[in-house]
Amino acid sequence: MKRMIYGLIVLALLASCSSMSVQTDFAQGVDFSGFETFKFEDSGNTLAGSAPLAHQRIVAAIRQEMNASGLTEVDENADVSVSYYGSTNEQLHFQTTYMATGFSRRGWRGAGVSVGTSSTRAVTVEQGTLMIDVWATEGDQLVWRGVVSKTLSGNPDRNTNKINQGIARVFEDFPPN
């Protein structure tokens, strides 16, 4: 029973540390049904210089989601342009483990002894954030923004999976109704 409770606590801690934050916003009154083509524009604040492989994965995932949304990529004269801004930062998380041992003598008096200990350790984790912007080329107006944040790992395959999942979640309701 103690192992099961300990396992549930560990799972809850892992789930809380790995949650993905997704937010989207769009310009009211914009008719998204008029947008048929897009062009990827490299912003000045991508991960191209510091993490070129991650940059390639992010761009590929954005292109895939824009195509899945019904837009066609073109080289010029696009209805909208899409770009992203990426950053990473370190965050300090605290993990506390509780352990209890006990001895009890059964009987009507219910005497017993219980000893509990806890230990807390600080863990530094890397948090990645992507902000994806869609601009109407006519009038150079920001019409949609999606932001996703997720804890990163040291494993490139896991991070690729997180990138794909995060960008897919951001584009779930794109284009907005």
Image (cartoon, rainbow, N blue to C red):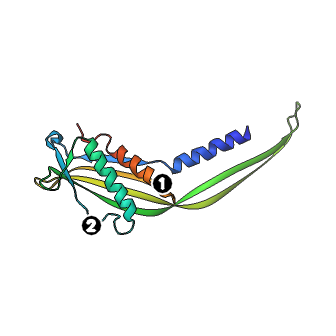
Do tag 1 and tag 2 residues touch (Cβ < 8 Å)?
no
Left or right, residue 90 beside residue 107: left
**Camera-side residue of 138 and 94:** 138
Task: Give the image location of residue 151, x and y in percent.
Answer: 47, 55
Viewer-nearest residue: 28 or 86: 86
Q: Where does residue 46 sit, x and y in percent of width and height? A: 32, 63
SS at badge 2: loop
Please state the total of marks drawn on the protein image: 2
Depth check: give the residue in front, 116 or 67. Answer: 67
Q: Is residue 115 above or below residue 4?
A: below
Q: Position of residue 50 (x, y in %)?
A: 38, 68
Does residue 148 sit above or below 5 in this rendering? below
Question: For mark 2, does the 10 Å Cα neighbourhood hold few (<14), some (14 to 19), or many (20 or more) residues?
Answer: few
Q: In the rendered image, which quarter contains the C terminus?
A: top left
Q: Residue at x 15, y 41 (%)?
A: 31
Residue 130 visible in image = no
The amino acid type of the residue labelled 2 equals Gly
Q: Kindly identify which residue carries mark 2.
A: 44
In the picture, the quarter occupied by the N terminus is top right
Q: Residue furthest bottom?
A: 49
Which residue type carries mark 1? Asp
Local crowd at mark 1 within 10 Å, few (<14), some, or many (≥20)?
Answer: few
Is residue 136 at least partly visible in the picture? yes
Residue 126 rendering spot, x and y as whole percentages: 48, 61
Of mark 1 and mark 2, the one earlier in the sequence is 2
Q: Secondary structure at mark 1?
A: helix
Q: Vertically, is 170 above or below 57?
A: above
Residue bearing mark 1: 157
Left or right of 133? Residue 123 is: right
Residue shown at the point (37%, 47%) measured from the top left: 22
